[in-house]
Amino acid sequence: MYNGKYFQISNFKGGYAGNLPDTQIDPNQASDLDNIVILPNGKGWRSRLGNSKLNSVALNSAADIQGIGYLLQADQDEWLVAVAGTQFLHSANIGASFTDASGAIVINAAADNLWTLFPFNDAIIAFGGPPDSPDTPFRWPGTGNAAALGGSPPSAYGGLSTNNRVFAYRTAALPSTIQWTIIGNAADWTGSGSGSAVIGSLSDGQRITGAIMISTNYMLIFKENSVHQMVTSQAPFPTYSLFDNVGAPGKHAMVNIDGIVFFISSEGKMFSTNGETLQRYPAIADDLWNSVQSARYPFIVGARQKGKDYDWLIWCVSTSGSTNTVAIIWDITNETWLQCTTGYKFNTVGFDSNKNPYFGDYAGFIFKPDQSGVFADASESGAGTITAFWQSGFINPDKIDKITDIKKMITVFTPKASGNITVDYGFDGVVNGTQFTIGQTVPASETYGQSTDFLTGRGNTFEFKISQSSSTIDTQIEKVLLAGKVAGQKGQTED
């Protein structure tokens, strides 16, 4: 019989903490992790599900997806729309087939020429193009071809609608100005009730980088190093300086989650605000943010993604090259950091009426994430294998009830129809020096799986990695138990 002392790790709520020294990471934190969902209250973790392609044929001969929008018309006709290269396309009922409706509009193709496409008065309104010299905005009414937006609108970097008006911000000539239409007409920028406002100071050298509604009557307007608030309930709309010395780099680097706006700063840090105070977030994942290329900050894409047991704020970022390569994730439910190094190489995102995200890549495809029964990523090459893992830090005895010289590890998991779990471990600075494998199948009479494994080696600090790599099955870890002796205790035996 084994008489050692046991320590249970059933809380994984600490998430990613790779910016901490390896010996200071708590048992509920990971020195590294990938492609996992931490369950509510940290009670276990599972590998994430995969994504699938929406469109069966690449849009515009595999062009970059530069914008995605959604239109639900008054007669309940439903459309997903996209800008891909030089084309504007639409799909009825969010189907797999897209139709080119570009007509005579001019769109400059390039991955960085991002668009915002939003519904207004039963039509899609679109602003975007090259960041420093935007294209002419256009309108699509749900039939026929798109056409240039009438009424001499600004060729603006971005736009949005609220309180029955359209707003547009940052033109080549007026980089610090936001403009708006009359009520109810996206093509009237000069009539009674239309207008414009300079945001901040014309001498600060900053451009408007984005705008987002924080509530029905309040808009946040971002510059590169400042945040401003506009009251949009009645024209002319007053604006106020909200925060100095912090701003946002690009128009997709801000997300409203239940009345709280999260944004990435121009220094590559995440902040949030309720329109009054500024919230900073734990630095335990700063090594992830430090790996993001600063030149690519303006092209960060943020999105909320919710599932049955998780709520994520996803930031698609670039760590190499000129495209977004990974996702850094704020787990809203558990208030911790995660990452996905595969499955989120996306340039833009749009949402349907149920807030389901649709991500656009750099090769003409739109993807639906987190698909039930899908265990591979269609966005990845080859089999789209998803590798999920949790890597602990070097756990010292002070963090596990003075237990030292770990001799036994019990892994509790949810049974699956097939597949294996791999466990690596090491002592005193040796990372993953020894490995064993656990089968995920168990007898039908058992409601959970449990593997008890005696370990070889010894040391005062201990680390482990639990991983699974598959394109056909997932895994779920419930808890881990570590057993060893307490320093100075004698008479502990095992068999």
Image (cartoon, helix red, strand yellow):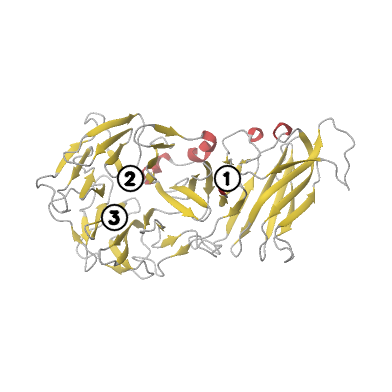
How packed mark 3 is, by other alpha carbons closer than 10 Å (few <14, some 14-19, many 20 or more), is: many
Q: Nearer the viewer, mark 3 or mark 1?
A: 1
State the CA–CA distance, disc 3 to disc 1. Answer: 37 Å
Q: Which mark is residue 148?
A: none
Q: In which quarter of the image is residue 66?
A: bottom left
Pointer 2 and pointer 1: residues touching (CB < 8 Å)? no
Pointer 3 and pointer 1: residues touching (CB < 8 Å)? no
* 259 or 67, nearer to the observer: 259
Question: What amino acid does circle 3 point to?
Answer: Leu
In the image, residue 75 sits, relative to residue 261, either above or below, namely below
Q: Is residue 371 left or right of residue 133?
A: right
State the CA–CA distance, disc 2 to disc 1. Answer: 33 Å
**Can residue 124 be seen?**
yes
Q: In terms of sequence position, does the residue under pointer 2 or pointer 1 come before the other?
A: 1
Question: What amino acid does circle 2 point to?
Answer: Lys
How packed mark 1 is, by other alpha carbons closer than 10 Å (few <14, some 14-19, many 20 or more), is: few
* 337 or 445, nearer to the observer: 445
Q: Residue at the spot x=56%, y=64% of the render?
A: 383
Q: Mark 1 points at which residue?
A: 41
Helix, strand or loop status at disc 3 = strand
Question: What amino acid does circle 1 point to?
Answer: Asn
How packed mark 2 is, by other alpha carbons closer than 10 Å (few <14, some 14-19, many 20 or more), is: many
Helix, strand or loop status at disc 2 = loop
Q: Name the residue under label 3.
A: 117
- Image location of residue 139, percent across then percent down: 21, 59
Q: Residue at the spot x=52%, y=54% of the render?
A: 342
Q: In terms of sequence position, does the residue under pointer 2 or pointer 3 come before the other?
A: 3
Q: Mark 2 points at which residue?
A: 251
- Image location of residue 320, percent across then percent down: 47, 46
